[in-house]
Image (cartoon, rainbow, N blue to C red):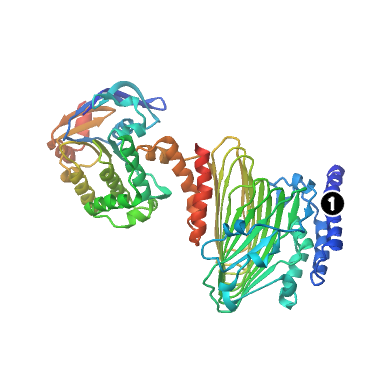
Amino acid sequence: MSSVIEESKNGAESAVLALHKQFLDADQPSADLLPFNKKALDIFESLKFPHRKHEMYTFVNTKVLADTSFSLKTENSVQNSFVKQHIYAGCERSHLTFVDGALCPELSDATALGTSVKIGSLIEAVKDESFKNILQKSIEQENDVFASINSAFMKQGVMVKVSRDKQVEVPLQILNVSSGGDSGPVMTVPRAYIHLEPSSELKLIVKYVGDGSNYFVNSVQDMVIEDNATLTHIQIEADSKDAWNFSKNRIFLKRDSKYLGYQTVSGTRLVRNHNEVWLNESGAEMELNGVSVLEEDEQSHQFVRVHHEVENCTSHQYFKNIINDRARASFDGTVVVNKGAQLTNSDQLINNLMLSDEGHADCKPNLMIFADDVKCAHGATVGQLDDDQLFYLKTRGLSESVAKEILTQSFARSIVQKIPFEPVVKELDETLLKKLVANNE
Amino acid sequence: MLEIKDLHSAVEGIEILKGISLTIKKGEVHAVMGPNGSGKSTLAKVLSGHPAYEVTSGEVLFQGKNLLDLSAEERSLVGIFMGFQYPVEIPGVNNAEFLRMAYNARLLNEGKDEVDPLDFDDILQEKMDMLGMEDKYKERSCNDGFSGGEKKKNEILQMAILKPVLSILDETDSGLDIDALRIVADGVNKLNGDDNALILITHYQRLLDHIKPDFVHVISGGKIIKSGGKELAHELEAQGYDWLTTAN
């Protein structure tokens, strides 16, 4: 590494260290979490901000982000009416609202969930030895510098635990509102721990919205899904135009458990989703779907690592990006089939639809297979609208612009329609798909 | 209704149609037959306005107007329907919604009001009942994952919805089993009347047992080499195309 890079990194990193000092002095972090905060800061120092050739950030330029000195938001306020419009139908009595990463009890209502779901803060959660171990391990083994920053600054967070054998009928919504930085850029660090006990089920909707601008949401979610449990996780990123949103999801799957993930990005300055999935016991299944609709200079980056640790597990990944103007999208996904993970069934498909000549898409679907009896497939496409489809629609009397609109929408819709929660599908039909209509006009 | 005069057409600089002339009147059914690579499908594509097929010379008049001046969607709007040999799959586009959009495009063009999904559903249901089609044709994406026979049935459903003046069915029979063929042919017969006309492009005489043509034309080497009544189709079936092509 050249000394120039070293030097500039030091500047960015010392800003984080200074911010952390301030955090320790002024923000009164919890005594229970403090050792974790400190450990995470050590990890941050050893990881450092990514340089341009960093394996995990090949396609994402984080220089501007790293060079921005953020402050931490302490005063949080947001209008009740703003929150209300972002609570989905069916979640009126099962939602938790976080403003700038802190739970707002007066804007939350979880009464419909009953006793089968336990909700608490991470301060409470670390009193449990098993969670403490998970947290410790994940902080010590952290490989992503931004996630280590989250851990270094985590304060309260949220723990959601579904009791054994409980199939929660009402969906739980977590709404992350960023109120933005009025006097300079701010960073927030939402942190969640989701735990499904054996044979339980939960549908979790996590939505990110901004009621202001100039902010960086840097979130981490750890999810443990025990034997025969199913977690449906719908993540909607609808932040303000100039926001950064980095999200790390760590998912641990046990025997016969299932994770169904859906991630949508409707366009922000820079979105990066880091998904790390461990299929740790036989019969575990995971599916991860994503769709991004980007225009102007928006960016959406997916970084996925799926670890098939044992035999008989299944993983499916399906991502679509629609890229207009100078927007950029990337997919960097590796499926690791470890020795002994026989009868693995895994596939990965990324489709990019380019609507302009200046847009940019990078794809790196990757397979690392150390077992010999597996079924794995991966593929990626980058293309424009299909001429045969266009012609077919035109022969039915539809104009060129309508035909293009239909085809662009259908490209996104094939993912949107898979989302197993109607209010989100309806909302995306309006937001994502309307954005496409506007693009075509 | 349709007058094709000495039509020449090329794809990527290679001339495929080398002077086709054909006149079609209201109420007539014309079968266009010929060996593979003779130019049958090219004729269909040229008439429907495919951008890859360049008309190098000749003229096509539809109801007295120059058809070649119109884009593919304009040709559809004035009443020309092309039934594709290989209907295109459009995943993510609901078939019923697609049919409604096509139907409304036609209405708007005629200066009429669009119909809403509920009213359209009645129209669609009536046509589907007529063609003996199941509800899945409404629910699924357009041609997506349809079998060959289902795709062809869906073409005929579109024809029923759009009520064209002139339909050009390009190898609608190929790949169909006998039951599917009968259903498709029955549908076409129900839709065809005295006010519209039909061009059936086919490789096999079999279709013509179900849809009786008034005229049969044989294309070979980009030209019509023989025209006749429906008995010509039987001769072709019995003797193949060789006796015609070698004679020329």
* Residue B53 at x, y percent in the picture: 37, 29
* Residue at horizontal 79 percent and vertical 62 percent from the top: A152
Residue closest to the eye, A421 or A275: A421
Q: Quadrant of residue B77?
A: top left
- Across and down, in percent, residue A204 comes to 58, 65
The residue indicated by pointer 1 is: A15
A240 to B26, vertically: above or below: below
Q: Chain of mark 1?
A: A
- Where residue B81 sits, quadrant-wise, is top left
Q: Secondary structure at mark 1?
A: helix
Residue type marked 1: Ala
Q: Is residue A338 visible?
A: no
Identify the residue shown where x is 42% and y is 27%: B12
Where residue B180 appears, as percent x and y from the top left, is 25, 52
| Number of numbered discs on residues | 1
**Is A59 positioned to the left or the right of B175 in the image?**
right
| Residue in front for this viewpoint, A300 or A170 | A170
- The residue closer to the viewer here, A375 or B140, is B140
Q: Residues within 10 Å of mark 1 (few under 14, many from 20)?
A: some
Identify which residue is drawn at 20% across, 51% down.
B182
- Compared to B183, does A220 lie above or below? below
